[in-house]
Amino acid sequence: MGRIQPSQTIAMSQKARALQSAGADVISLSAGEPDFPTPRHVCDAAIEAIRAGDTKYTDIAGTRSTRAVLAQWLKNLRGLDYGLDEIIICTGGKQVIYNAMTATLNAGDEVIIPAPAWVSYPDIALLSGGKPVVVPCAPSTGYKLTPQALEATVTPRSKWLVLNSPSNPTGAVYSAGELRALADVLARHPQLWIMSDDIYGQLAYGPQWRTGPQGQALAPNILQVAPELKNRTLIVDGASKAYAMTGWRMGFGAGPQALIKAMVKLQGQSTSNSCSIAQAAAKAAFEGPQNCVADMAAAYEKRRDLVVASLEGVPGLACLLPEGAFYVFLSVGGMLGQKSSQGRPLNTDHDVAEALLEEAGVATVPGSAFMAPGHIRLSYATSDENLRQACARIKAFCQAAQPMKA
């Protein structure tokens, strides 16, 4: 356990809450969760399930009715066909990833993780006995993995490639062409499985991503351009981000029957089924009206534009325009080597994040947590007014920074 690090996103959120509880004026841009309430029809379905007595154990993989809805949702949205025995419902997307890695990794098996990346991928790989192999991806490639970098990283021990699009923390989205180019490399390495983390898949911004069957926003999935990889691809998705259901803990995986069977076996000896009420709520989310997703996505896109415009030209900062999710990944490289107005040295992204929290009252997450030092992540899943105030504070903080004396 000494190799495993606590989640820095959770740590920064907890520190911000502690300061707020003590009376400090803190605006938190650290949490990776929607600020919108869970849609009413979803909550109503959960209440009805309680009243109907649907409070017993379910199948370990989840109720057949909810899995059937998920299978139909994948078919309708992405044109992908899955049977009920190819879907598992878990207690959040994180458990899907943990189940998959634990069920498949032997000691020393490698998990290729393009970085910047979500904080938990490497630690879940370590907990599962694997070896995380982090591949730095530069701003010049949009923080995305290139076919050349993938080819140079694969070894005979490579077991999983993690693809997260839209990305946490960068908001980067892989195009169909970029996914096809990666698939061409994967075709040469049949031992390498693909974990397609699509948890932000419906939160993609701009006309180029309006590829859903009703013209809704949808980030491409690798199986839509390379269906031949289906027998070694696991789709990871859930209700948390698109349906504002983080606390319900409802994720699911869709993949080959043998893999799902192994994951169900593991889950049967750990948590057993996910919450029956959360499953009923998720069923309503995925089969019910989808305008709530579009409405939230439209609000996030406006907030993204607000943040990027507010921080444009601020000395010491730079960022690419995020194409999805609800994060801005700011380079703070121009701030490093300076000191804050209160004399705090700003030598690392941790220093910048700590100073922003304690001196400016803005909670962010250091880029080092995402394997990308020299950055900070801002979540724009909060109100417009909070974002305006937070950006004004960040701008004032940066403008007041001074060079370190020799």
Image: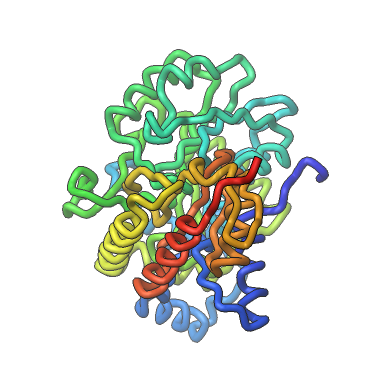
Q: Which residue is rendered at x = 59% and y = 42% of the image?
A: 337
Q: Which residue is rendered at x = 44% and y = 51% of the image?
A: 199
Percent from the top left, x then y, of residue 159? 59, 26
Q: Which residue is rendered at x = 24% and y = 45% of the image?
A: 209
> Could you tell me if residue 246 is visible in this image?
yes
Q: Report the side of 380 relative to 116 (left or right).
A: left
Q: Report the side of 210 relative to 202 (left or right).
A: left
Colouring method of the image: rainbow
Percent from the top left, x then y, of residue 237? 45, 51
Query: Residue 385 falls in which quadrant of the image?
Result: bottom left
Query: Residue 15 falls in which quadrant of the image?
Result: bottom right
For the C terminus, the image quarter is top right
For this rendering, which residue is in front, 399 or 319?
399
Q: How many marks?
A: 0
For the N terminus, the image quarter is top right
Percent from the top left, x then y, of residue 14? 65, 67
Residue placed furthest toward the right: 2
Percent from the top left, x then y, of residue 168? 47, 48
**Above or below for 286 versus 22:** above
